[in-house]
């Protein structure tokens, strides 16, 4: 494969990552959200493997496999099990209506392109153009956490942010050193256990996973 | 020595996970923490004799800046372990914590100490991030230990907000690595702080200033700087008091440490005061907002959590200001605040157990009820508001002098913040310690050694700064220039 083709394929996958991010932003049903999250992880994993192949960075294969097993298989599975156990079927309401959220999302993408412009100019890597997409994914994950008041969607937003960060690392620098990648993966794994426990605690205490109900700690009363 | 220092808490965590809720678990916890402290002292002596050193194939790095924080961390965690023995036993008797809860509590306490020490001692800024996240994760479930609705809410907030915040810091780290890779080549070597700090003037300034914004937001969330502080009063007030003591006294310091380490690199690259200005801005806003929030508090632990935000603001401001005097003041301030604040939380813990409430209006007559708790709280409050002869007076005085010299316009704001905080805390503490004993107050055995030890240290350092300590600080100031 010549570099030009690879750069194209990579941009194509980046577009898919961004597309799934937007998909998650508008998706109301929790099951579909998890599926979208898994798809995003899959695109990420393929993109990482391709970059690893072209750039000859073999530790990226490990990152790719890690992403595949953690973000495509394990985490969606855990979330799935938790949702079945806790019998969550309800659709999730957004605070701001969906067209508005989309517009904010688009603004965030433009903002990301603007912000990463100096970095892109300095970079010589074939993946440099995807850095903006990575930052946009982080921002959209953040937006999703703000606009949804449900514990599960907040977690998915959080994990989507993590995806974006991982993507940023691959596109800006061909991946962080392996020690760091492994450590981050470990942290995510621990976080997964913690939110699992949390869902149960919140569910038994508040009888729902709606974060809106958690508003007892306020100032001045 | 360094590996012993890191290994002990990790080992203790595993042991305590097996010991569980047996009668001697608190003692094992104390022994583990004491061993960590001994190792910390040993390492300090080594560094004192030999100067900065690298260990474990450049993976760990010790210099004057992180060694003093490591000794402080291991010391405070030891005294907290002593305090938590009595405190948690009483909570257990009252059924606020169950069987599993106790096992979990002890193991996670040690894991938390391990994470903090790893943060301090690692040379790799990527690993620094990982350890910071680990420190958050290990305390999240400790905050929700009591399983009350408010505790769970606080822990969830802590988990989500710090998770999001620290994700920004990871993006900052990625950008930093991007800049470093150009100069140092790829691989783990280019994330090593020692390599980066030598080459910092070759790093690309535009990328580094962008990276610093992300790092500031990320680690700033963990420092509890306004407006990223929302999680802090909740997390610090809803968890068990020993955890509040270590969160306020130690974890905030560690986050600030990470931020300052990054600032040194950014300064070296940009040759401007850009990073310092951002830190000063965050610092001064934190001081003011926290000081005025202090006035409105009704819950005793919440009030002292806001005071932590204020003091972290002061330290951040001083680091941002830069210059030898301000940096010296900031280092001293971190030390003093950590000792004074954890000691306050010890007395607050006992006071609230005596009344079974954290509401300040219901806590009364501590002088008569239990002189040690009463006077401990009184002296602690005097120390924390910066009255002479306590150590915080010294550090705040240094910072104020430096402000008047380098940023005179900021002086009135700083003074206003300090004044309001003084009034707010003093008014409340006065009410709680004086007066008659209310009938619902129950006498109890208290852990008096930790409080006295901390207060003695704060007092001694306030009156006479030991020679070795000031020499350490001077070396650290040189490093951070």
Image (tube, coloured by chain):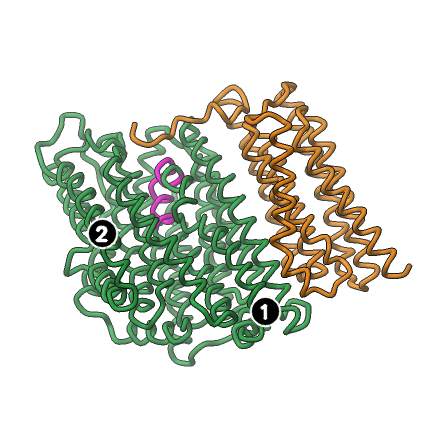
Chain colours: A orange, B green
**Predominant SS along the magenta part:** helix
Residue A11's place in the image compared with B458, above or below, is: above
- Local crowd at mark 2 within 10 Å, few (<14), some, or many (≥20)? many
Rendered location of residue B231, percent (x, y): 42, 40
Rendered location of residue B456, percent (x, y): 20, 59
Q: CA distance from mark 1 to mark 2?
A: 39 Å
Q: Which residues are magenta?
A: B235-248
Rendered location of residue B12, percent (x, y): 47, 53
**Residue visible at 48% across and 21% down in the picture:** A206
Q: Is residue B84 visible?
A: yes
Look at the image and say whether residue B223 sits in the magenta stretch.
no
Answer with mark 1 or mark 2, whichever residue precedes in sequence. 1
Rendered location of residue A146, percent (x, y): 54, 34
* Foreground tag (1 vs 2): 1
Q: Is residue A185 visible?
A: no
Please, what secondary structure does the residue beneath circle 2 have?
Answer: helix
**Residue visible at 20% across and 64% down in the picture:** B462
Quarter where residue B64 is shown: bottom left
Q: Which residue is mark 2?
A: B418
Q: Which is nearer the eye, B10 or B186?
A: B186
Mark count: 2
Please state, as top left, top right, bottom left or bottom right, where the C terminus of chain B lies in the image.
bottom left
Q: Which is nearer the eye, B469 or A148?
A: A148
Q: Which is nearer the eye, B1 or B374?
A: B374
Q: Is B352 on the left or on the right of B229, as rendered?
A: left
**Residue visible at 40% across and 32% down in the picture:** B97
Quarter where residue A75 is shown: top right
**Label drawn at residue B204:** 1
């Amino acid at each position: 494969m010549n570099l030009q083709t690879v750069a194209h394929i990579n941009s194509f996958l980046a577009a898919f990552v961004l597309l799934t991010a937007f998909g998650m932003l508008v998706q109301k049903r929790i099951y579909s959200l998890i599926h979208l999250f898994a798809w995003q992880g899959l695109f990420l994993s393929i993109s990482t493997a391709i970059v690893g192949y072209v750039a000859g960075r073999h530790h990226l294969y490990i990152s790719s496999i890690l992403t595949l097993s953690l973000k495509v298989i394990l985490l969606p599975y855990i979330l799935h099990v938790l949702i079945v156990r806790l019998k969550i079927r309800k659709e999730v309401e957004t605070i701001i209506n969906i067209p508005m959220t989309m517009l904010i999302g688009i603004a965030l993408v433009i903002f990301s392109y603007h912000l990463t412009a100096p970095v892109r100019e300095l970079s010589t890597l074939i993946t440099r153009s995807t850095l903006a997409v990575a930052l946009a994914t982080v921002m959209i994950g953040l937006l999703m956490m703000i606009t949804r008041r449900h514990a599960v969607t907040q977690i998915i937003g959080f994990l989507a942010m993590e995806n974006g960060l991982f993507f940023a690392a691959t596109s800006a620098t061909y991946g962080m050193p392996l020690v760091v990648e492994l450590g981050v993966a470990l942290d995510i794994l621990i976080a997964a256990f913690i939110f699992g426990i949390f869902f149960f605690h919140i569910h038994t205490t508040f009888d729902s996973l709606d974060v809106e109900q958690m508003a007892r700690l306020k100032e001045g009363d | 020595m360094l590996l012993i220092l890191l290994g002990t808490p990790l080992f203790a965590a595993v042991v305590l996970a097996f010991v569980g809720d047996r009668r001697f678990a608190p003692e094992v916890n104390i022994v583990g923490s004491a061993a960590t402290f001994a190792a910390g002292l040993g390492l300090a002596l080594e560094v004192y004799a030999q100067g900065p050193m690298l260990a474990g194939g450049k993976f760990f790095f010790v210099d004057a800046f992180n060694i003093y924080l490591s000794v402080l961390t291991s010391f405070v965690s030891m005294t907290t372990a002593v305090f938590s023995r009595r405190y948690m036993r009483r909570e257990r008797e009252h059924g606020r914590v169950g069987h599993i809860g106790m096992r979990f509590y002890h193991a996670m306490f040690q894991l938390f100490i391990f994470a903090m020490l790893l943060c301090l001692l690692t040379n790799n800024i990527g690993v620094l991030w990982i350890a910071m996240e680990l420190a958050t994760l290990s305390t999240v479930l400790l905050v929700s230990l009591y399983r009350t609705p408010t505790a769970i809410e606080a822990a969830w907030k802590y988990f989500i907000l710090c998770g999001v915040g620290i994700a920004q810091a990871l993006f900052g780290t990625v950008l930093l690595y991007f800049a470093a890779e150009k100069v140092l080549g790829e691989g783990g070597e280019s994330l090593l702080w020692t390599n980066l700090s030598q080459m910092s003037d070759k790093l690309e300034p535009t990328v580094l200033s962008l990276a610093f914004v992300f790092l500031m937001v990320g680690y700033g969330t963990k420092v509890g700087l306004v407006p990223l502080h929302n999680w802090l009063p909740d997390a610090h007030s809803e968890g068990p008091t020993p955890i509040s003591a270590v969160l306020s006294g130690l974890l905030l310091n560690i986050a600030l440490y990470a931020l300052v380490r990054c600032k040194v690199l950014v300064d070296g690259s940009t040759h401007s005061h850009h990073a310092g200005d951002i830190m000063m801005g965050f610092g001064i806003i934190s001081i003011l907002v926290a000081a005025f929030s202090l006035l409105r508090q009704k819950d005793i632990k919440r009030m002292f959590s806001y005071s932590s935000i204020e003091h972290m603001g002061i330290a951040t401001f001083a680091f941002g200001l830069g210059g030898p005097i301000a940096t010296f003041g900031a280092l001293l301030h971190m030390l003093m605040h950590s000792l004074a604040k954890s000691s306050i939380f010890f007395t607050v813990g006992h006071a609230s157990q005596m009344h079974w409430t954290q509401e300040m209006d219901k806590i009364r007559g501590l002088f008569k009820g239990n002189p040690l708790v009463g006077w401990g709280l009184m002296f602690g409050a005097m120390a924390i508001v910066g009255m002479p002869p306590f150590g915080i007076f010294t550090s705040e005085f240094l910072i104020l002098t430096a402000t008047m010299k380098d940023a005179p316009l900021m002086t009135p704001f700083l003074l206003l913040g300090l004044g309001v905080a003084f009034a707010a805390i003093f008014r409340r503490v006065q009410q709680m310690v004086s007066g008659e004993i209310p009938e619902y107050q129950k006498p109890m055995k208290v852990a008096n050694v930790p409080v006295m030890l901390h207060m003695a240290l704060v007092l001694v350092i306030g009156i006479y700064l030991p020679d070795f300590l000031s020499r350490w600080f001077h070396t650290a100031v040189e490093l951070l220039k």
